[in-house]
């Protein structure tokens, strides 16, 4: 390569370097560069963020019973036969006590092998087979819950299982509206107070979210084999339907 060619390359590199050094980039406080590229350097959330809570006390109007049968016998056929006979009697008792067919739904059906450890054989041995059949029944007359439980126990006998009982509201729409009114009013009151204390003016809400929850489940009712229950007292109590909202208001300048 000739000395003249190397000299030309060197001059080109010097010119390019001078151009880069001579370029000055200015930016504004808002993050706008001379090349018209805008960078938003303010990532903080703006506005007034408040939470509101609304609560309505409601008397439950439906009962949900989860019940069924469980039969343990030496063969699958024996267990299935006894479970089916007992379950048919329970279904008939539910229907006779005003529970409609479309308010009864199967939740579980299983056949399981039951084993135990034999220390002499040093191995698992089969004890028998357990057939379980569980349904949920919706009762629209809460006051009849106790008598329906009694009828189910009498019909199913020792194979009867009542796994859980819960109380709920068949149509909570209107109660949710009331709770929502209270929650939003609560949030608005907090936002107004913050505005007054800080001397700002609130704008319109730009974000609203809500969450709905209310406790309704009651546990602890279980009928074991051989149990005798003459009367079953049931107390549904009251339900608390809760709605929580979060609202973000703009700040007018």
Image (tube, rainbow, N blue to C red):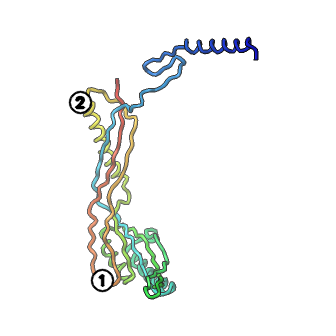
Q: Is residue 252 above or below residue 247?
A: above
Q: Quadrant of residue 23?
A: top right
Residue 124 location (% of width, % of height): 47, 82
- What numbered label is drawn on residue 228? 1
Mark positioned earlier in the residue sequence (2 or 1): 2
Q: Which residue is mark 2?
A: 197
Depicted 82 relative to depicted 46: above or below: below
Please provide percent x and percent y for residue 196: 24, 30
Location of the N terminus by quadrant is: top right
Instruction: Tell which residue pokes out farthest to the right in this image.
Output: 1
Relative to residue 187, is residue 106 drawn left or right?
A: right
Q: Is disc 2 placed on a helix, strand or loop?
A: helix
Q: Residue at x 33, y 84 (%)?
A: 226
**Left or right relative to 15: residue 226:** left
Which residue is at the front of the view, 64 or 5? 5
Q: Which mark is residue 153?
A: none
Q: Residue at x 73, y 13 (%)?
A: 3
Residue 63: x, y in percent? 35, 66
Task: Decide if residue 126 is in sight here.
Answer: no
Left/right placement of residue 237 relative to residue 17 reads left
> Does 190 appear above or below 167?
above
Name of the residue lying farthest toward the left = 197
Residue 123 position in % (x across, y down)? 48, 83
What element does badge 1 sit on?
Answer: loop
């Amino acid at each position: 390569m000739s000395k003249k060619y190397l000299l030309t390359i060197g001059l080109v590199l010097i010119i390019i370097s001078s151009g880069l050094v001579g370029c000055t980039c200015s930016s504004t406080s808002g993050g706008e560069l001379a090349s018209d590229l805008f960078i938003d350097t303010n990532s903080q959330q703006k506005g007034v963020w408040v939470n509101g809570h609304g609560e309505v006390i409601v008397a439950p109007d439906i009962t949900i019973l989860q019940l069924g049968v469980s039969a343990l016998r030496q063969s699958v056929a024996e267990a299935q036969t006894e479970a089916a006979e007992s379950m048919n009697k329970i279904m008939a008792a539910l229907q006779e006590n005003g529970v409609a067919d479309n308010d009864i739904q199967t939740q579980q059906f299983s056949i399981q092998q039951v084993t135990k450890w034999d220390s002499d054989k040093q191995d698992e041995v089969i004890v028998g087979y357990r057939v379980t059949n569980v349904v949920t029944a919706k009762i629209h007359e809460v006051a009849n819950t106790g008598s329906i439980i009694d009828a189910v126990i009498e019909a199913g006998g020792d194979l009867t299982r009542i796994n859980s009982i819960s109380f709920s509201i068949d149509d909570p729409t209107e109660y949710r509206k009331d709770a929502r009114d209270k929650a939003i009013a609560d949030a608005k009151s907090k936002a107004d107070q913050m505005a007054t204390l800080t001397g700002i003016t609130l704008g319109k809400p730009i974000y609203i979210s809500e969450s709905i929850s209310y406790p309704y489940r009651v546990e602890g009712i279980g009928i074991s084999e051989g149990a005798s229950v003459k009367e079953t007292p049931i107390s549904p109590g009251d339900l608390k339907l809760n709605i929580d909202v979060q609202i973000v208001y703009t700040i007018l300048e």
